[in-house]
Amino acid sequence: MIAPFSWPNKVWGKERFSQLIDRFHDELGLRTVVVSYPEIGPFNNPGVVCAFDLSLGQIAGLMQYAGLYVGLDSGPSHMAAFFELPMVVIFVEQRTFPFEVRPLTPSGVYVVESFFTTEDFPQVETVFNASRMIFFRNKEEVSVCPVCRNKMQYVLRAENNIVRMMCSCGLSLDQTFPEFTEPYNAKHDSKKDTIIFRENSDLVEDLNLSLKPLKISYLESWRLELAAKMPKEVSIVFSKRQPGLSKDCRLEKGTLQLSLDSLIIWMKKHEYNLKKVDQMNGNVHLYFARIKQSSLEKKEKKLKIPWNNTFLNVTESQYLRWYSYDSWANPDSLVGIVKGMSELASWKREILSCALVAFSAQKTMRSFRWIFKAFLSSKV
């Protein structure tokens, strides 16, 4: 089933859907039912049935017989999620975070390719391969992020049998299907990506993650090194350019791209707090200190944490609790879209504090709106 209708700023285009229908028919042998309004015009592709102007109840009835659903950010997509159909949702409009409005489903993915490239729309190739992956997985749940343990449901690119999946924390991983999982492997194939310790020092050398995409096996190796050496401080150089997400970067199974948020979360899980942040030559230098039992009750220090092309003056805990992830951030239009408003149901004082920080980072009417909303909160 395909549902190609939504608000004008969220549509993918009839021609792209038509190409997708042809590939479903020619390469997978699938017939397609198109549910939409008559205004979109007929689809004359082989194996297609147009079911226009149906009621929501009739659409729900058809969904019970569908083996795959492809749609947009629209009501029918949320209905398909309710029926737990294998599904692919295409996100086009970039003024809304997909992870805040996504249909909640354990067996679907969200194509967000145009959020991370210069293209206005996701490619037909990406949507087709993402759909093929979901169809052959037959309702199996997608894998979880090796850092934050949330489901990796965001498709950045897809070529043949390799899909670049991303977690909401910004970590991306090239995975194959139908296997679709990548076990940990502690072996290194390059000494450049190990954690190196100076002689007679507890400080780790700069770990440079800005040069190239990594392998998922490196995460386990770094974990073992940290557990064995337990350095007092760790310094990591991180590139905000995210070379692993560029359109011309070849997909390769097991390729890993860490984000600012996934780095902070991963280090915190291994008992290291963010101590200092510097930004130089397009790279971010993150300094972590090992958590001491005696310091757990101490008041956290505020940091200037990069958030796209601006900064948030907050503590590490506030940043992780309050704000939408840096990987999705677009301060010009999205600053102030905070977790405390839409997800955490925080107290009024906390909501107001995080809204004020967002407004200080980028003063726009959109971010000012969240300050106004904080005063309307029912919690004191």
Image (cartoon, helix red, strand yellow):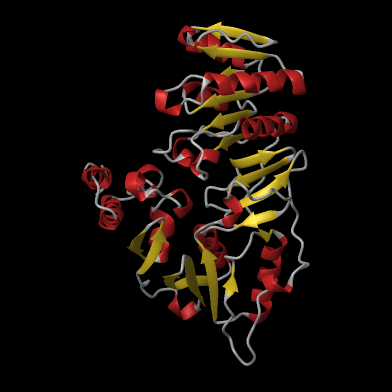
Q: Percent from the top left, x then y, of residue 7?
A: 41, 23
Left or right of residue 251: residue 290: left
Q: Nearer the viewer, residue 54 or 94?
A: 94
Q: Quadrant of residue 304?
A: bottom left
Quadrant position of the N terminus in the picture: top right
Q: Is residue 82 visible?
A: no
For the point 50% across and 7% down, the residue is: 54
Q: How many marks?
A: 0
Left or right of residue 338: residue 216: right
Q: Nearer the viewer, residue 151 or 347?
A: 151
For the point 74% across and 51% down, the residue is: 182
For the point 55% across and 30% down, the residue is: 89
The answer to whether 165 is drawn above or below residue 292 in the figure is above
Q: Nearer the viewer, residue 241 or 319?
A: 241
The answer to whether 15 is drawn above or below residue 162 in the figure is above
Q: Percent from the top left, x then y, of residue 149?
A: 60, 52
Q: Percent from the top left, x then y, of residue 91?
A: 50, 33
Q: Percent from the top left, x then y, of residue 329?
A: 42, 50
